[in-house]
Image (spheres, grey):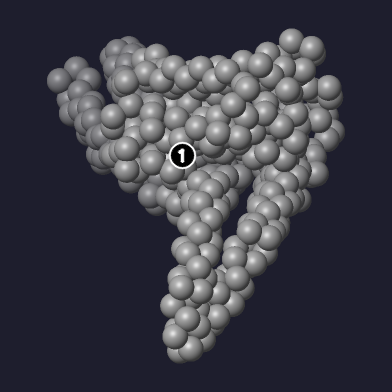
C-alpha cells in the first residue's frame, strides 16, 4: 500500500473512531432523553386526571364529563389515554411522519424505551365510575431523536468526505517531489551522476533536495577522479611493463644469448680436447649468470621490497637505501627507523617501502641533493614516514609525476594520507601518515567492500 493511502486510511480510522465515540455519547443521551420525556408526560397526564377528578366532585353528573376528560388528551404526542367503564373512550397520539423515512428497527431497539402503563381509578363521592389508563408511546420522541441524529450526521459525513478528498490531493501534491527524488536516485544508481533536482519545495524537502544535489555532485567528482586515476594506473602499469621489457631486452636477453654462444663454444672445445679454452668460456657463462642475477634481483626489488617478508621493515628500507648508496655514494643517507614494527602487516609495510622507494628515486634523479633523510616512526595507532632532501626542490609543484601520484593513491587505499612540502632551491619533503595495521588486520579490496 502506498504512503498516500496509508495516511488516508489512518485519517479514516481516526474519523471512524471519533464518530463511534460521538455515536455512543449520543446514544446514551438519547436514551436518557426519551425516558425522561416519557416520565414527564406520564406525570403530567396523571396530574391532569387528578385535577379533573377534583372538579368532578363539584358536578352533579360526573359521567358526562369523563369523555371530555379523555378528549382533552387529544394532540398529546406521548400518551395514549383509554377510559374503561360503563362507556369506553380512547385517544391516541398522532403519529408524526419522518422527513428521512421510517425509523429503522435497529435504532428503536437501540434506544430500548418500553411503554409504561399507569391506571387511575375514577371515584367520586364513593362511587366508582371506571379506570383511566395512561400509556406512554415513545414513538414520536424516538422519531425526534432519529431526526436530530440524521441531521447531526450529515455535517460530520460531509466534513469527513471533504477532509479525505483534501488530504488525498494535498498528500499527492506533497509526495510528488519524492517521486522525482526516487527517479533521480535511480538515475544516480545507473551512473548518471550529473542528475540534479530543482524547483521550489517545502523547507523539509528543500533540505533533502540540497543534500541529494551535494551527494550527486560529490559522486560526479569522485567518478571523474576515479576515471582519471584509472587512466594514470593504466599508464603506470604500461610504463612499468615497458621498463621491465626494456631491462629484460637490454640487460638479460644479450647475456642469455652470450651464455648460449659460450655454452656451444665450450662444448665444441671440449669435444676437440681444448679444455683450457673451454674453461674460459665457462667462466664467461658464470660471469653472465651473476650479472643476470643482479639484474633480476633489482627487477624483483621494484616489484616487491626485498627483505620485507624475510627480515622486516628495517631491512627492507635499508636495502632500498643501499641500492642508491652504491650508485650515488657522494650523497649522505641518514636512516632512522623505530623498532616498534615487529607485527606490522604486509600491506602497510609494502606501502611504506613504496613511499621510501619513490621519494628516494625522485630525490636522486631530479634534485641533486647532498643529504637525504629517511625516518619511519610510530605514534599511537599511526605510522609516520618522512623522506626529506636538501636538493633543488620541485620546479612545478602543481604537476606531480606518475610515481608520486601512484604512491599517493596507494597510501589513500590503506586509509592514510600523503603530503608534500616543496621549498624551491632548498629541498623537498614527502610525508606519509598510515594506520598501524598488524598482521591480523587487513584492508578490504574494492571487490570485497562491494560484496559486504
* Residue drawn at point x = 45 percent, y = 52 percent: 448
Q: Where is residue 280 in the image (x, y as percent from the top left)?
A: 50, 68
User: Residue 130 appears in which quarter of the rendering?
Assistant: top left
State the residue position of label 1.
Answer: 350
Corner quadrant of residue 148: top right
User: Residue most toward the bottom?
Assistant: 271
Using the image, determine if residue 119 lies above or below residue 40: below
Of residue 195 and residue 108, the one placed in the foreground of this image is: 195
Residue 122 in the figure: left or right of residue 282:
left
75 or 41: nearer the viewer: 41
Residue 13 visible in the displayed image: no
Q: What element carries label 1?
A: helix
Q: Position of residue 418 (x, y in %)?
A: 60, 25
Whether residue 250 sits left or right of residue 344 in the image: it is right
The residue depicted at 23 percent of the width and 30 percent of the height is 118
| Residue at 39 percent of width and 14 percent of height | 379
Query: Does residue 188 sit above or below 46 in this rendering?
Result: below
Pointer 1 local density, CA inside 10 Å: few below 14, some 14–19, many at least 20: some
The residue shown at (61%, 73%) is: 257
Seen from the viewer's position, the closer of residues 448 and 46 is 448
Q: Position of residue 92 (x, y in %)?
A: 42, 40
Please give left or right for residue 316 compared with residue 239 in the image: left
Q: How many labels does the image show?
A: 1
Q: Where is residue 97 in the image (x, y as percent from the top left)?
A: 57, 45
Amino acid at each position: 500500500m502506498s504512503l498516500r493511502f496509508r495516511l488516508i486510511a489512518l485519517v479514516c480510522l481516526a474519523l471512524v473512531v471519533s464518530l463511534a465515540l460521538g455515536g455512543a455519547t449520543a446514544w446514551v443521551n438519547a436514551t436518557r432523553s426519551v425516558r425522561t420525556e416519557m416520565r414527564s408526560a406520564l406525570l403530567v397526564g396523571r396530574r391532569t386526571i387528578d385535577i379533573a377528578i377534583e372538579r368532578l366532585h363539584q358536578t352533579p353528573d360526573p359521567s358526562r364529563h369523563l369523555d371530555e376528560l379523555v378528549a382533552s388528551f387529544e394532540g398529546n404526542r406521548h400518551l395514549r389515554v383509554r377510559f374503561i367503564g360503563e362507556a369506553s373512550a380512547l385517544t391516541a397520539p398522532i403519529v408524526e411522519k419522518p422527513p428521512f423515512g421510517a425509523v429503522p428497527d435497529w435504532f428503536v431497539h437501540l434506544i430500548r424505551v418500553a411503554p409504561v402503563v399507569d391506571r387511575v381509578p375514577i371515584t367520586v363521592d364513593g362511587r366508582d365510575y371506571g379506570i383511566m389508563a395512561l400509556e406512554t408511546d415513545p414513538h414520536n420522541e424516538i422519531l425526534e431523536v432519529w431526526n436530530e441524529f440524521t441531521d447531526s450526521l450529515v455535517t460530520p459525513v460531509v466534513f469527513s468526505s471533504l477532509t479525505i478528498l483534501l488530504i488525498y490531493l494535498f498528500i499527492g501534491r506533497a509526495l510528488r517531489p519524492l517521486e522525482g527524488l526516487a527517479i533521480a536516485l535511480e538515475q544516480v544508481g545507473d551512473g548518471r551522476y550529473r542528475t540534479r533536482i530543482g524547483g521550489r519545495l517545502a523547507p523539509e524537502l528543500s533540505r533533502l533536495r540540497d543534500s541529494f544535489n551535494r551527494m550527486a555532485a560529490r559522486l560526479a567528482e569522485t567518478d571523474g577522479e576515479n576515471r582519471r586515476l584509472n587512466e594514470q594506473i593504466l599508464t603506470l602499469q604500461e610504463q612499468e611493463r615497458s621498463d621491465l621489457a626494456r631491462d629484460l631486452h637490454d640487460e638479460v636477453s644479450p647475456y642469455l644469448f652470450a651464455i648460449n654462444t659460450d655454452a656451444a663454444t665450450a662444448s665444441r672445445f671440449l669435444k676437440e680436447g681444448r679444455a683450457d679454452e673451454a674453461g674460459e668460456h665457462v667462466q664467461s657463462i658464470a660471469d653472465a649468470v651473476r650479472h643476470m642475477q643482479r639484474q633480476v634481483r633489482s627487477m624483483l626489488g621494484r616489484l616487491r621490497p626485498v627483505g620485507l617478508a624475510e627480515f622486516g621493515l628495517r631491512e627492507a628500507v635499508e636495502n632500498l637505501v643501499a641500492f642508491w648508496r652504491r650508485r650515488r655514494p657522494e650523497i649522505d643517507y641518514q636512516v632512522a627507523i623505530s623498532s616498534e614494527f615487529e607485527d606490522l602487516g604486509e600491506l602497510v609495510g609494502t606501502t611504506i617501502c613504496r613511499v621510501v622507494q619513490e621519494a628516494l628515486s625522485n630525490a636522486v634523479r631530479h634534485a641533486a641533493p647532498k643529504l637525504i633523510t629517511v625516518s619511519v616512526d610510530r605514534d599511537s595507532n599511526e605510522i609516520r614516514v618522512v623522506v626529506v632532501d636538501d636538493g633543488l626542490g620541485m620546479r612545478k609543484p602543481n604537476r606531480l609525476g606518475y610515481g608520486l601520484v601512484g604512491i599517493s593513491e596507494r597510501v589513500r587505499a590503506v586509509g592514510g594520507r600523503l603530503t608534500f612540502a616543496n621549498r624551491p632551491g632548498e629541498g623537498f619533503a614527502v610525508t606519509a601518515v598510515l594506520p598501524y595495521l598488524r598482521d591480523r588486520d587487513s584492508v578490504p579490496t574494492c571487490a570485497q567492500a562491494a560484496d559486504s
